[in-house]
């Protein structure tokens, strides 16, 4: 999914936020500003991993009537306009309700690269991984600081594309300090896949710090917050474009970057 010896910035935004069409505009702007890949969130009524900003955005998307088909069409429109991997971040229930085979087929047809699945236990993930692999989709699982070494090894073995390392315990959201070096080192003992760190990153300095020990940075809440706080959509997109430029500069600043 990512080139070897590079540092990658992944930006997150839920589909349907602030609207389906404006979400597509925003995601394209994020790539133009320097994101190397995108995570498009699938709005869900029980987002156990999402912090206040993402929950607010997801609630607005659901109130707008955003459904799984809208998410897949968002992937299709963004993938057609960009040259970067586009993943869906989704909880398991919506995939199961939509139909595993049907979801994987539609995501692959839309040009999607895979899924991040925060609540699907790896020990129960084989049915998804088999279907995803058949359609050429990557399956990304999340390791937490509390994960045992055995659990980290299981997560690394089940993941394809990259491994998502949570910088901290808890839900998504901006943090004044970021960490994760120890967890990244433990994951590297178990796999040669790239290891990207998410949760808590909100500025270029933090992105640069994370890129110093990981293969990339994943940013969601800080991006969402810019739109939530903007007086209108165009201002929000401009604010997000500026933030992603700053994050990309921090992520790509180190030796070996593209």
Image: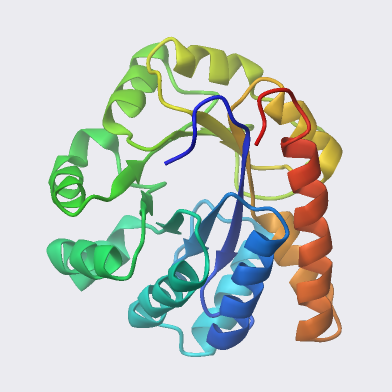
- Asked if residue 98 lies left or right of residue 174, the reply is left
Q: Quadrant of the C terminus?
A: top right
- Nearer to us in this view, 44 or 109: 109
Please, is residue 10 above or below residue 208 in the view?
below
- Asked if residue 9 lies left or right of residue 164, the reply is right
- Asked if residue 230 lies left or right of residue 42, the reply is right
Residue 55, x across and y down, in percent? 60, 66
Tell me which residue sits at (43%, 9%) in the image.
Answer: 189
- Residue lying furthest top in this view? 189
Res 203 visible: yes
Tell me which residue sits at (71%, 42%) in the image.
Answer: 200
Please, is residue 115 above or below residue 167 in the view?
below
Tell me which residue sits at (84%, 80%) in the image.
Answer: 235
- Nearer to us in this view, 258 or 129: 258
Quadrant of the rendered structure where residue 217 is?
Answer: top right
Q: Quadrant of the N terminus?
A: top left
Residue 210, x across and y down, in percent? 71, 29
Residue 252, x across and y down, in percent? 72, 36
Quadrant of the rendered structure where residue 151 is?
Answer: top left
Tell me which residue sits at (73%, 42%) in the image.
Answer: 201
- Asked if residue 135 lies left or right of residue 67, the reply is left
- Nearer to us in this view, 218 or 215: 215
Res 45 visible: no
Quadrant of the rendered structure where residue 149 is?
Answer: top left
Residue 162, x across and y down, in percent? 43, 35
């Amino acid at each position: 999914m990512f080139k070897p010896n590079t540092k990658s910035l992944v930006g997150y935004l839920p589909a349907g936020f602030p609207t389906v069409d404006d979400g597509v505009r925003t995601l394209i702007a994020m790539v133009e500003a320097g994101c190397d890949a995108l995570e498009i969130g699938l709005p869900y009524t029980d987002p156990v991993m999402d912090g206040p900003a993402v929950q607010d955005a997801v609630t607005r998307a659901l109130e707008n009537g955003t459904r799984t088909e809208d998410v897949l069409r968002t992937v299709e429109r963004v993938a057609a306009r960009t040259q970067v991997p586009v993943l869906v971040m989704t909880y398991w229930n919506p995939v199961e309700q939509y139909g595993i085979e049907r979801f994987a087929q539609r995501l692959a047809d839309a040009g999607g690269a895979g899924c991040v699945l925060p609540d699907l236990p790896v020990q129960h993930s084989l049915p998804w991984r088999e279907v995803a692999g058949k359609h050429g989709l990557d399956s990304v699982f999340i390791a937490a600081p509390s994960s045992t070494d055995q659990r980290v090894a299981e997560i690394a073995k089940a993941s394809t594309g990259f491994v998502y390392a949570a910088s901290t315990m808890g839900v998504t959201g901006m943090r004044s300090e970021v960490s994760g070096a120890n967890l990244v080192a433990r994951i590297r003992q178990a796999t040669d896949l790239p290891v990207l760190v998410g949760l808590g990153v909100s500025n270029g300095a933090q992105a640069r710090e994370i890129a110093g020990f990981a293969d990339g940075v994943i940013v969601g809440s800080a991006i969402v917050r810019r739109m939530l706080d903007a007086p209108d959509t165009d201002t929000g997109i401009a604010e997000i474009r500026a933030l992603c430029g700053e994050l990309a500069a921090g992520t790509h600043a180190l030796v070996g970057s593209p």
